[in-house]
Image (cartoon, rainbow, N blue to C red):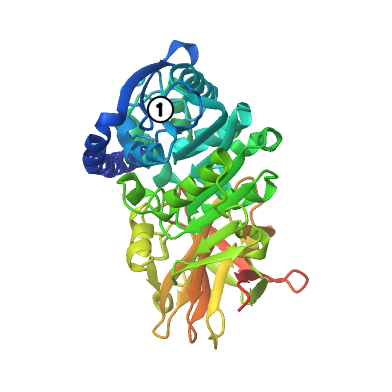
């Protein structure tokens, strides 16, 4: 059953990937053509002799004096080397030498897809070596930036190469396992999207193919192997090295990123001791940066240029004096500045989950996190998140608790946490928690969600569950309620509920259950 489901999901998501990639390439064509006069296409020898396809954009009038700062841009997963040409041209117009390259395993570059493994990190250093040898780049002013896959490689490279003085990691990851395996639950749509894109546009390594197969089949004997594989590719593993090297780090992501959720970036940001900046906006994976790839005005890329201007060119543009945490709510315009991540949630309000509830597993109640990419894009463009009729959710398959009606707007900011006591009838299982904004007619708009999976529990024996829902910024209007819904099936995730399983949520007197909602001080 697992193999059939995987094939179907991968095929379907592969079609979506193909459409996205084709659309991006077609859309970039005009920008690429416009940049052709100042672009030089080259081949660079990467780690182990692997040839990487790259292009170099040089400022007008550049010479061999070595006075131009260098920015290196590794490509995103499944996208060709023309991805950044519009931005590369704009950066070159500001005096930067810009080198963009196709990461190994994709398109014209050689090798296999290693998922930001050691060869990818070594490739980044080889690319820098080549740029210093073949362009008038300043070895003391080197930066890296990237979207998605390129973002992760940038952070890893900065932890391993002291020459990198500034990084802009856009829609990337700090913890790969916490991204696609949070709550010990496989984010299957996200993984299938990556798998499908790699199959269409690249050459997966044997190790990657094995990891994907083990991920889909949910073989617990392989779990530690997957975790170890992910940790090796997580910037969070090399945090001490990154802090020691001192590279200035800008992190930007979208609230609804279904591949790399906001939580893992926020936690990583708090532990950085280097000059740092954190930005969250509405959208899904890489959608906040997309218009900038077409050369259009874009906040993410504007801030990226300001970051490099300050830390590579010494421009006093004030970005170092601004509040370092910048958030944009999904429901209201304008940015909010904070001194750090913990200040985002000035207060917390608890919603009691006092009433016990028993639900049956294996059936989707109708409460869902949406569809990868599509749902969060609709939320970004039209403020239309996934919805559910809370009164009509079948209580056989969904547990529901609601707050009182709020007399004023509740500005949810940060990470909602769930604490409850769970008694399962089977030793393993999965629950998915959802927080909804419920209007007067009972229609709930999804605020946030997260999955949670357990194994090896004693049937009939209660245990405590503490779950962080994905961080967000959402304004609940006056007259609305918040509702916490829990069920066992969501198409975004692989569920581990044996047939006939039941879950009982309770609230013992000595350990009451609640959901803690972070609120901005008004």
Q: Secondary structure at mark 1?
A: loop
Residue 431 at x, y = what percent?
53, 57
Q: In the image as oriented, which residue stretches furthest toward the top? A: 49
Residue 336 location, x and y as percent?
54, 66
The number of discs equals 1
Q: Residue at x 54, y 58 (%)?
A: 470
Foreground of the two, 332 or 22 = 332
**Residue shown at the point (55%, 38%) measured from the top left:** 312
Q: From the viewer's perspective, tell me whether residue 138 is left or right of residue 289.
A: right
Quarter in which the N terminus is drawn: top left
Q: Nearer the viewer, residue 175 or 183?
A: 175
- How crowded is the residue under tag 1: few (<14 C-alpha within 10 Å), some, or many (20+)? some
x%, y% of residue 125?
A: 53, 22
- Report the front residue among 171 and 194: 171
Please name the residue that numbered disc 1 is placed on. Answer: 62
479 versus 310 height, above or below: below
Q: Does 75 sit above or below residue 329?
A: above
The one of 470 and 212 positioned closer to us in this rendering: 470
Relative to 458, residue 364 above or below? below
Quadrant holding the C terminus: bottom right
Rendered image quadrant of residue 94: top left
At 58% across and 49% down in the image, what residue appears? 264
């Amino acid at each position: 059953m697992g193999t059939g489901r995987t094939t179907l999901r991968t095929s379907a998501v592969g079609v979506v990937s193909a459409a996205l990639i084709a659309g991006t390439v077609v859309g970039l064509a005009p920008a690429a053509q416009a940049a052709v006069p100042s672009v030089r296409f080259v081949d660079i020898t990467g780690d182990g002799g692997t040839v990487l396809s790259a292009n170099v954009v040089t400022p007008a009038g550049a010479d061999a004096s070595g006075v131009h700062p260098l920015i290196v841009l590794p490509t995103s997963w499944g996208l060709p080397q023309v991805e950044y040409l519009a931005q590369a041209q704009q950066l070159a117009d500001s005096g930067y030498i810009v080198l963009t390259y196709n990461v190994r395993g994709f398109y014209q570059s050689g090798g296999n897809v290693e998922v930001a493994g050691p060869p990818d990190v070594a490739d980044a250093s080889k690319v820098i070596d080549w740029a210093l040898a073949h362009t008038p780049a300043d070895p003391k002013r080197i930066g890296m930036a990237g979207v998605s896959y390129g973002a992760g490689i940038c952070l890893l490279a900065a932890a391993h190469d002291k020459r990198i003085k500034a990084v802009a990691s856009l829609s990337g990851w700090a913890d790969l396992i916490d991204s696609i395996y949070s709550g010990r639950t496989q984010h299957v749509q996200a993984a299938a999207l990556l798998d499908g894109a790699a199959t269409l546009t690249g050459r997966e390594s044997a190790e990657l193919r094995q990891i994907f197969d083990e991920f889909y089949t949910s073989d617990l004997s392989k779990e530690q192997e997957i975790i170890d594989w992910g940790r090796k590719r997580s910037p969070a593993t090399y945090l001490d090295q990154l802090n020691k090297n001192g590279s200035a780090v800008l992190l930007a992501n979208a609230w609804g990123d279904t591949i790399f959720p906001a939580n893992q970036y926020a936690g990583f940001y708090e532990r950085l001791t280097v000059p740092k900046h954190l930005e969250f906006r509405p959208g899904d994976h890489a959608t906040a940066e997309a218009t900038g790839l077409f050369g259009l005005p874009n906040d993410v890329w504007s801030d990226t240029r300001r970051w490099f201007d300050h830390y590579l060119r010494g421009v006093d543009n004030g970005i170092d004096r601004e509040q370092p945490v910048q958030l944009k709510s999904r429901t209201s315009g304008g940015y909010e500045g904070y001194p750090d991540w913990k200040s985002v949630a000035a207060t917390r309000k608890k919603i009691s989950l006092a009433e016990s509830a028993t639900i049956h597993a294996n059936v989707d109640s109708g409460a869902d996190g949406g569809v990868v990419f599509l749902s969060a894009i609709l939320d970004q463009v039209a403020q239309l998140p996934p919805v559910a009729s809370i009164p009509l959710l079948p209580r056989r398959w969904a547990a529901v608790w609601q707050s009182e009606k709020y007399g004023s707007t509740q500005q949810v900011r940060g990470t909602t946490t769930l604490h409850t006591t769970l008694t399962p009838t089977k030793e393993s299982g999965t629950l998915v928690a959802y927080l909804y904004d419920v209007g007067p007619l009972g229609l709930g708009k999804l605020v946030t969600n997260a999955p949670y999976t357990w194994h090896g529990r004693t049937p009939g024996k209660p245990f405590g569950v503490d779950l962080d829902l994905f961080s967000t910024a959402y304004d609940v209007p006056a007259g609305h309620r918040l509702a916490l819904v829990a069920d066992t099936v969501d198409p975004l995730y692989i569920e581990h509920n044996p047939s006939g399983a039941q879950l009982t949520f309770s609230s013992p007197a000595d350990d009451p259950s609640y959901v803690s909602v972070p609120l901005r001080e008004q």
